[in-house]
Amino acid sequence: MIEQFTVEEVNLLCIFNTQNRNALISELSEAITDIEDGDMFEIAQNALNKVSKISDEDFAALEFYPEYGDDEQEATT
């Protein structure tokens, strides 16, 4: 079973290459070393743990699209 990603995790992952699980793991692992904000570090670490635990097949079935809050959607429409 695929562990669900939070909205924050999905939005973070969307800034990386999500076409390939190994590339995503590599890019996110490298980026984590530069994250100074504690909350963002925790989000990144949780996302990395989840991506690392799923199979390539399960990862390929996922679709990553940024999610916007209601206020942000209204501002862009």
Image: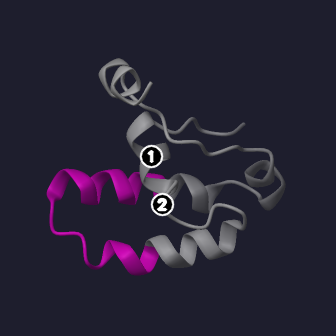
On the image, the x and y values in percent for residue 43 come to 34, 51
What mark, if any, has residue 15 been given in the picture?
A: 2
Which element carries disc 1, helix, strand or loop? helix
Q: Look at mark 1 in the image and give the residue it sits on.
A: 11
| Residue at (37% x, 58% y) in the render | 44
Residue 39 sits inside the magenta stretch: yes
Instruction: Tell me: 40 left or right of 67.
Output: left
Where does the N terminus fall, quadrant-wise? top right
On the image, the x and y values in percent for residue 13 come to 50, 55
Q: Is residue 62 above or below residue 38?
A: above
| Residue at (62% x, 57% y) in the render | 53
Mark 2 belongs to which amino acid?
A: Ile
| Residue at (15% x, 60% y) in the render | 37
| Residue at (44% x, 46% y) in the render | 11
Q: What stretch is highlighted in magenta?
A: 29-48
- Looking at the image, which is closer to me, 46 or 77? 77
Task: Tell me the crowding category of disc 2: few under 14, some 14 to 19, or many 20 or more residues within 10 angstroms, Cα based.
Answer: few
On the image, the x and y values in percent for residue 29 come to 44, 75
Q: In this view, does 71 lie above or below 19?
A: above
Where does the C terminus fall, quadrant-wise? top left
Which element carries disc 2, helix, strand or loop? loop
- Looking at the image, which is closer to me, 44 or 50? 44
